[in-house]
Amino acid sequence: MSSAPVANISIAGLLRSMKSRGYTKPGAINELIDNAIDANATKIDVRFNTETNELIIADDGDGMTKAIADKMYCIHNDKEASSKIGLYGIGKCAAEGLLSDVKSVTTTITKHANDRLWEVNADWLHSIAANEWTPRAAGASADIGAPLWDKEAINKVHGTVVRIPMQPNNMHSIIESMDTILPEIAYAFQECNDVIITVTVNGIVLSMKTEDALGWNDPALSDKQRLSTSLEVFVKDGEPTRVYHREGGVFKRFNPNPTTSTGKPIDVLQAALLDDRKEAIDSGYSLNTSLALRVVYNPKWNPPPITGEDGTRPEFIRGNVSWRRGKRHIARIPQDVPISGDHERRRILGSVRSSIDYDYRSDALIKTEGDKSRITKENIDPVLLHTVRTIIRKWSAAYYTEHVKEAEIANNQAHVPVPRDILHWFKDKWSSDAAWRETIKSEVERAKGVQIAH
């Protein structure tokens, strides 16, 4: 198996469980693409062939020596301190297990510059039957490895080719779902500008576009519509995590239980930030990891009312918080939308898009040590998640106050009311515009001859 095998487990059971590990099909494909990016690939081809029912993933990365290829399918006791290996090293295994339905032999052909061609075959059915898992690199065979390399390799000098025979129903399911799979792949690697990823079906190149991109470099945006800040996570055994963020050049944290002098809870946005980072270090807290947060608001995600007879307004496009490990967006968590408050402020906050950049040191906090395919808000450290959400909420509120609400007041221009938003608009207008309120009262009294209570 490996130099550090996992003891006292059923290899057959572990291999069978690979395909039910929670991967989605896009997640499994993304895992294999991610491996190629880890190998410094600049070009990656994902090729589906419905005639042979095979998936080929080829890259022009560094390739592997025999020593590295021997460890490619190893299952480890402990997570190696690497951004490239998940817990127990089963990312590649799980991805291939799902895509092959653990019913075929998956083959990896690889070549490192100035080295020979190596071939590794993972025979799932044999391994399950024999309760053993021993894929090892050998010289490329004349009947499998060499012809596969000659046909599929992007760069004949270095790189890797992975062949995954698929069950016909599995292949059919992926092809039928391509309209949803392609955007997931495009979203995951949207910022890998130095990598060309091409997906083909029977040689036909498919278009990969995503409408959910962060758009940080959109030239139409101004600096006031973007926020970039950093976070530091401190941990101590037996104590809650502390997450500090840069505020005015100093790292501070949100009070986890903000109250008034009388002990009454208040909104965290109204509470003073805690400047106790040094105190935390002195008391035994240590820096676990640093993260980068970017927040973007683009008005095109929050369309204005449509000029017309009914004055209808399109729904805003709900934003998301993207958790990004290395160069890859792993998960999108929908942006929170307040259920009360100023209606336009709610729309702005709801349409904001954000990204969190982290590395393997944050895996335990974000629960990506198992694999790099998926996370949910329930997996993320609650203090870290609360801090991220509060920063986004605070920035969005400030943007609305400084750049939207004040401009409306200055220009005496309120948003045009629309049927679906009329209640929110009317409440906001009634409470904020005394002159308008008195005018409405007078007009109603005059028209109906009734007295309106003040």
Image (tube, rainbow, N blue to C red):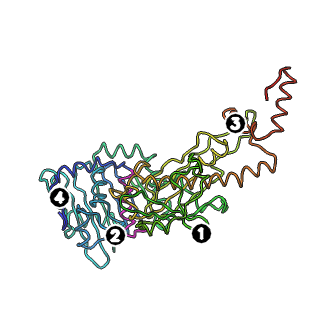
Q: Is residue 153 visible?
A: yes
Q: Would you name the residue on which mark 2 appears?
A: 159
Q: Indicate which label's residue lies in the foreground, 4 or 2.
A: 4
Q: CA distance from mark 4 to mark 2?
A: 25 Å
**Residue at image point 44% right, 54% down:** 185
Q: Is residue 41 magenta?
A: yes
The amino acid beneath tag 3 is Thr
Judged left or right of residue 304, residue 279 is: left
> How many neighbours does mark 4 have within 10 angstroms: few (below 14), some (14-19), or many (20 or more)?
many
Vertical arrangement, residue 5 with respect to residue 350, above or below:
below
Circle nearer the viewer, 1 or 2: 1
Q: Amino acid at mark 2?
A: Gly
Measure how far apart labels 3 and 2 are at the Cα level: 55 Å
Q: Amino acid at mark 1?
A: Gly
**Residue under numbered circle 3:** 312
The answer to whether residue 318 is seen in the rendering is no
Which residue has dot 1 on it? 249
Magenta-colored stretch includes residue 367:
no
- Determine the secondary structure under disc 4: loop
